[in-house]
Image: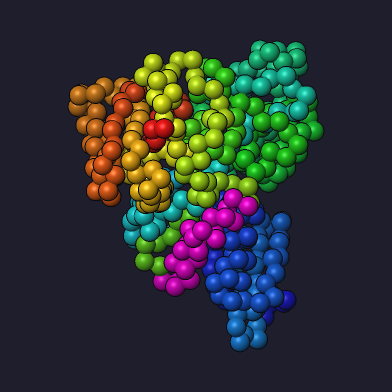
Amino acid sequence: MDPATAQPELLRLVGSNTIGSDLAPTLAKAYMNDVLGAVRVEVRREPKEHRTVVEGYLPGATEPSSIQIIATGSGFAFEALRDGLADIGMSSRTITAAEEEQLASLGNMRDRKSEQVLGLDGLAVVVHPSNPVTVLTLDQIKRIFNGRIKQWSTLGGAKRPIHRYSRNRESGTFASFIGMVNLDHGRLAPDITYIVESSDVSDAVAGDPDGIGFIALPYIGQAKAVRVAATAGPGFPANRTLVYREDYPLSRRLYLYAPPNPTNPRVGEFLEFAQSPAGQKLVDATGFVGRTLEPLDTAEDPHPLPKQAPKAYTELAQTADPLPVSIRFKPGSAEPDSKAWNDLPRLVQVLLTPQYRNREVVLAAFRNRDTVPGADQAHVQDAAIAELKAELERKGLQNVKVADFGPALPVAADSTPEGREKNRRVEVWLSR
């Protein structure tokens, strides 16, 4: 197919390399095949330009139509939307306040129609397979990448220097990692090797016995992923179920952003397909975590109950099963966030089936460390929990109770805005 003879692009997606490398092209090809009825659909990659073009012939067309995907990093998603160079922005981090302000002319980019969670991903911290280190805390990871920990022997490994590998600074993976471990840009170790492509980071670490890097879950490759602990303890493995629940300390969301009232009619159609069961199965098939996990899959928990778990939480675990979903809220708000709005209807639908409707639902609420029940700063938290309980009851679930566990069992650093929003959560448990 000659690009010069192609019709104008049906869609232009710009942003995250994590999404744009494989997931977006996979979705684009299926969208053209299954929704538009295109034939002879081909995927053409242009690695030097970080571009992928998906081309096919729409019914009755004599020239190909295309979807263009440019995957240069999440920051470019919002620049391209601002400059009219993208219909959909791909981002592996949430939009910043500054970016939101720059795009104000397009509408409310925090609206549920604009900010859509495509799936979830975990950032794995990877080392060489021969490295004896198996668990790292968020603080240790921070000190490794700011250069304060220089030798593996400090962490129980060999007396050898640590070699650090990172995604490029423009990538959403880089920005997410910086926020998750509270690592200031100006305090990065000067000897870090920056790499553009996700898979190349894993390859570099797998080939370097002294290497360490961070990478999206599907790109672990031949490297070894260590367990990650928020503060101490056995840590959490980079596990799909824990990422789905967002309990894994380095879990993150993958977003698609678009104006709430796009001028291109294909935008809403593509987003609807991406959120459909067929689209979400492709998210899973590409190695990420879509919303196809069974909400009542109560298989053995992939990590032991933490030693510091409150007695009441241990007792809950003896009489109930955790569902692989955690409800989180918009920052500073009692309103569930965009992912929760998608999860709740499906969860309620299952819980109302005869098999489960008479079992007690327990909302296990976790607060930030400086949020004390009854204090002024707790009003938003209390309102969020009360509204969630009321919403479930409005949907027909009458056997709902709340268990407040305060700041116990943080899953991220409470000292960062991102960590605080992860720790302010509601787990959903179902009595046996």
Q: Is residue 85 left or right of residue 329?
A: right
Rendering coords of residue 321 (x, y %): 44, 32
Rendering coords of residue 133 (x, y %): 68, 20
Specify whether residue 273 is painted magenta: yes
- Give the quarter of the image for residue 136: top right
Q: How is the image coloured?
A: rainbow
Q: Is residue 343 left or right of residue 20?
A: left
Magenta stretch, overall SS: helix
Q: Is residue 105 above or below residue 371?
A: below
Rendering coords of residue 358 (x, y %): 33, 41
Q: Is residue 71 left or right of residue 378?
A: right
Rendering coords of residue 163 (x, y %): 71, 26
- Give the quarter of the image for residue 373: top left
Residue numbers of the magenta segment: 263-285
Specify whether residue 142 is painted magenta: no
Q: In the image shown, does 234 or 393 lie closer to the viewer?
A: 393
Q: In the image shown, does 220 or 301 lie closer to the viewer?
A: 301
Residue 387 visible in the current orientation: yes
Residue located at (42% from left, 38% from top): 326
Q: Is residue 257 above or below residue 165?
A: below
| Image quarter of the N terminus | bottom right
Residue located at (71% from left, 56% from top): 47
Residue located at (48% from left, 58% from top): 275
